[in-house]
Amino acid sequence: MGRCARIHPFAVLACAVVCAALGTKASVPNQQVKVPTTALMGAQLSTVAKGAGPQSTPAPGDKRESKKYTLPRDRYEKAIAYSRAGYTLYFVMYFSNLLVLILILRLGLAAKFRDFAEWSTGNRLVQGILFIPILMLSLSVLDLPFRIDGHWLSLRYEQSVQRWGSWMWDWTKGALLEAGFAMIFAMILYATIRRSPRRWWLYFWIASLPVIFVIIFVSPWFIDPLFNKFEPLDAKHPELVTELEKVAAPA
């Protein structure tokens, strides 16, 4: 493990960036967003409409009246302000995370984590199991202030009703998932570097694709339920189901 870290010190950076891209989905907090009724009509029409028959394709010239939803002036301005604040935070967080990764490498923190793993055990596999979670959890802790700011914005602009305790628990689960995924990709990364020091980047990409596809497909069953509660729409909002059925009914 030490040999690989010395030959390719930026391998940790590549692994962390890949895992950060995957972890964005896993660490999304359980925010309950207020969505207009008409927006739900278009997004959930095929899943919640009960008793609605197959959708018929409108014939040429068949014009159906559509409802247009317009935000009040104050809500529109609030939505614009929230959008701008969110974009600003996103770019600040992105470049800050990149800077943190560079500083961890330049200041030798990654090397200290490696030395600790090598001091703890001589088994390379166990060294990786120790090194990667420590590195990823450190990155998550350094990124925590930006995540807190993001949730504060969602509360301020009434885009979430999630309490801080529940949000913090979701963040903890997300950080642990990121560390676990990072460990899987790091093992693949180190294996490809040892086998092909010159073409490791190509083989790592090829070997990572099946893992990424598996994570994407199992996410709705195993990952999403960790952060969200799914239930039938008519359990708490039967009035929306009624409106959706009216829209789905043939004109």
Image: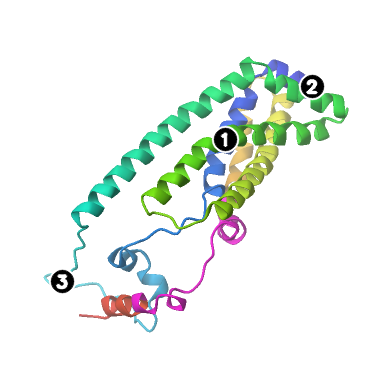
Per the image, the residue denoted by label 3 is: 65
Q: Are marks 1 and 2 in contact (CB under 8 Å)?
A: no
Where is residue 229? Give x, y as percent: 54, 64
* Figure quadrant of residue 211: top right
The colour scheme applied to this rendered structure is: rainbow
The part of the chain drawn in magenta is 214-240
Q: Residue sitting at 72 percent across and 16 percent down?
A: 6
Where is residue 240? Give x, y as percent: 35, 75
Q: Please, what is the three-letter code of the amino acid marked with disc 2? A: Asp
Q: Is residue 114 left or right of residue 232?
A: right
Q: Residue sitting at 35 percent across and 78 percent down?
A: 239
> In this picture, is 191 found above or below 8?
below
Where is residue 147? Give x, y as percent: 51, 41
- Crowding at dot 3, Cα within 10 Å, few <14 / some 14-19 / many 20+, comes out as few
Per the image, the residue denoted by label 2 is: 115
Per the image, the residue denoted by label 1 is: 18
Along the line of sight, the residue nearer the viewer: 180 or 202: 180
Whether residue 214 appears in this view of the structure is no
Quadrant containing the N terminus is: top right
Which secondary structure, mark 3? Answer: loop
Along the line of sight, the residue nearer the viewer: 76 or 137: 76
> In this picture, is 107 found above or below 233?
above
Q: Please, what is the three-letter code of the amino acid marked with disc 1? A: Val
- Crowding at dot 1, Cα within 10 Å, few <14 / some 14-19 / many 20+, comes out as some
**Of circles 1 and 2, which is in front?**
2
N-terminal of the pair, mark 3 or mark 2, is: 3
Along the line of sight, the residue nearer the viewer: 169 or 224: 169
Q: Residue furthest right?
A: 122
N-terminal of the pair, mark 1 or mark 3, is: 1
